[in-house]
Image (cartoon, rainbow, N blue to C red):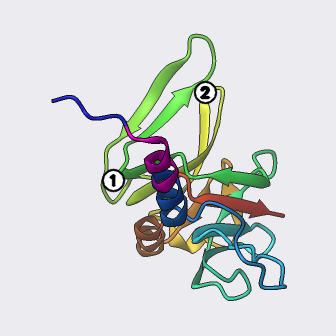
Amino acid sequence: MLAKPLRPDGVLALAMLLAAACSIGTPPSSGSPPQIVPPAVHLVLRLGERRLYLIDGDPRTPDESFPIAVGREGHETPTGRYQVEEMIEHPDFVRIDHGPPRRIRERVPPGPDNPLGERWIGFIRGNGWTIGIHGTPHPELLGRAVSGGCIRMRNADVVRVYERVRLGTPVIVEP
């Protein structure tokens, strides 16, 4: 069935109805500047404090904070603004031999001896390397600079953070 063309006055009425329904036009001025809405959930890593802050809304009042281990000398955790790029439950740990030829030296399946613990939250990628937030079977090392650049957390803590973040969640790493 073919539709009948609208008359010119019908087109104008339809356009006005759509404009009203879609709030097209300039919103009324309240006299105050628009408020900047912070991202819902984001992570702030303060390397000097050795803490990860989970922020949901107001950055002055973090929802939770957790002790972390950070990158050791020569393998410092990079500072900057990133976002969650990868999330894995019960990750495999793979140790790479970077010398020619490049090959896998060791693979550790999920379990109590896995250096990545219960969760992996990747947020920086480079040429052949990735940095992320992960659990650890050695919580006694938290508060120290001991990793190859990653952020280590208690397994229970990284599971809590994993449940709150999504791909694209902002990650801010401060000195």
Tell me which corner region of the image, top left, top right, bottom left or bottom right, holds residue 38.
bottom right
Label 1: how many residues lie within 10 Å, few (<14), some (14-19) or many (20+)?
A: some
Q: Position of residue 154 (x, y in %)?
A: 49, 72
Q: Residue at x 65, y 59 (%)?
A: 171
Q: Residue at x 37, y 48 (%)?
A: 91
Q: Which residue is drawn at 63% across and 18% down?
A: 99
- Residue extending furthest toward the bottom: 61
Out of 101 and 5, give the one closest to the viewer. Answer: 5
Residue 75 relative to residue 141: left or right: right
- Residue extending furthest toward the left: 1
Q: Which residue is drawn at 45% across and 70% down?
A: 164
Residue 168 relative to residue 75: left or right: left
Q: In which quarter of the image is the C terminus?
A: bottom right
**Amino acid at the residue labelled 1:** His
Q: What element carries label 1?
A: loop
The answer, for residue 2, to whether it is visible in the render is yes
Disc 1 designates what residue?
Answer: 90
Q: Where is residue 103 in the image (x, y as percent from the top left)?
A: 49, 19
| Magenta region, residue range | 6-13
Disc 2 designates what residue?
Answer: 128
| CA distance separating discs 1 and 2 | 21 Å
Say if 63 sits above or below 137 in the image: below
Q: Residue 41 magenta-drawn?
A: no
